[in-house]
Image: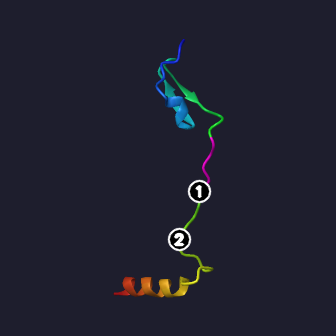
Amino acid sequence: MDCINCENCKLNAKTYFCLAKNDFVINTQASTLEKVRTGWKKGVKEYESHRRKSRKEVEV
């Protein structure tokens, strides 16, 4: 079975469909992405002013 260069294996996905094998392939070497939380936190400089402003918008 020869590769037909569909480039699915080069997407770095956990699973992909291989046209040459006509089957789904599970890639164990794919890197897992860690979820990063971004946004307003209490340690941020303008946290309190942002919180107060957003609360005023909700109350109105």
Q: Residue at x 54, y 82 (%)?
A: 47
- Nearer to the camera, 7 or 14: 7
Residue 33 picture location, percent across and down: 60, 49
Element at badge 1?
A: loop
In this rendering, position of residue 50 left or right of residue 14: left
Residue 32 picture location, percent across and down: 62, 46
Residue 54 picture location, percent across and down: 43, 82
Mark number, residue 35: 1
- Nearer to the camera, 54 or 12: 12
Residue 60 picture location, percent across and down: 33, 87
Q: Is residue 22 above or below residue 46?
A: above
Q: Residue at x 38, y 82 (%)?
A: 58
Circle 2 is placed at which residue position? 39
- Answer with the quarter of the image where residue 53 lies: bottom left
**Residues packed near mark 2 inside 10 Å, few (<14), some (14 to 19) or many (20 plus):** few
Q: Where does the magenta region start and end?
A: 31-35
Kind of residue at disc 2: Gly
State whether the magenta stretch is mostly helix, strand or loop: loop
- Answer with the quarter of the image where residue 10 lies: top right
